[in-house]
Image (spheres, rainbow, N blue to C red):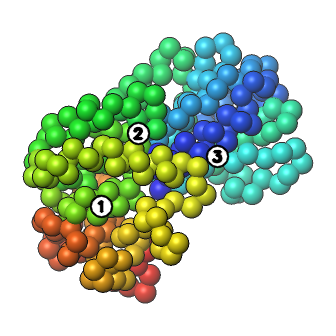
Amino acid sequence: MPEGDTVWQTARRLHGALAGSVLIRSDLRVPKYATADLTGRTVLDVTPRGKHLLTRVEGGLTLHSHLRMEGAWKVYAPGLRWTGGPAHQIRAVLGTAEHTAVGYRLPVLELLRTTDEHRAVGHLGPDLLGPDWDPGKALANLLADPARPLGEALLDQRNLAGIGNVYKSELCFLLGATPWLPVGALPTERAAVLPGLAKKLLEANRDRPVRSTTGLRGPDLFVYGRAPRPCLRCRTQVRVADQGDGSRERPTYWCPTCQTGPAPAPGSASGVRRFRSRTNN
């Protein structure tokens, strides 16, 4: 799933390809905007906001997109074959004389007035990779509901924007707490470093082609995707379970030795997954 660093990279790639150029092709393949035409307008900038992308064009319009689980933007030079997926998965095409940006499987695509961008992103908390970053505000947001599991609080973009399922699991490991620990039970000294640690991880990876949280030449991640392999620190078997509100449960990884706090019981609604031939998600 794309996280804040991936979206930041996508925005930079789109900005480099489109900003300052006039659109000579515009094709929004969603019913509501099928007749919208942006040709003849100059692309002003492409800005990331958490996991959202804001493509601003001349005339006070913004194309808002969100990648969620499957979406992707690809950039092609003239004459290159589009390889991001079959044609029926294309949701947007923005072309200039030098580049064509193609949006595949975009679950969110809407055309807004730039002055109305708050309708799309106004609910977001401080952006870990944005100019509005405020660690104090982010921590206050996280602690506002002290009984909420740490993992769920980290994924809530209203608290701080940019953390996805990978960073959720990795941050909890680095903090030595299971994702099911109530956020208010996190020791004060660990809570104090949480926002800065999250920002450090995303900033370190925003320019990397392969995400890494370990700083090692070997494995790139401490726990995410590693079940049932041994923990890199203590060699205990890494575990995986679903975490969420029932409607959006996500695989969550942790080390039962290095991380303290509650964990789901096997057979519960968010129980420990049984390992099959393929365990990485």
Q: Residue at x 64, y 26 (%)?
A: 45
Q: Residue at x 25, y 32 (%)?
A: 136
- Residue 50, horizontal then vertical, whole percent: 44, 38
Distance from label 1 to label 3 (Cα)?
31 Å
Q: Nearer the viewer, mark 1 or mark 3?
A: 1
Compared to 169, does 277 lie above or below? below
Element on which disc 1 rests:
helix
Q: Where does the C terminus fall, quadrant-wise?
A: bottom left
Q: Nearer the viewer, mark 2 or mark 3?
A: 2
Check disc 1 and report the residue beneath it. Answer: 174
**Residue type at numbered disc 3:** Trp
Q: Residues within 10 Å of mark 1 (few under 14, many from 20)?
A: some
Check disc 3 and report the residue beneath it. Answer: 73
**Residue type at numbered disc 1:** Leu
Label 1 vs 2, first from the N-terminus: 2
- Residue 156, horizontal then vertical, whole percent: 30, 43
Q: Residue at x 66, y 12 (%)?
A: 59
Check disc 2 and report the residue beneath it. Answer: 128
**Residue type at numbered disc 2:** Leu
Element on which disc 3 rests:
strand
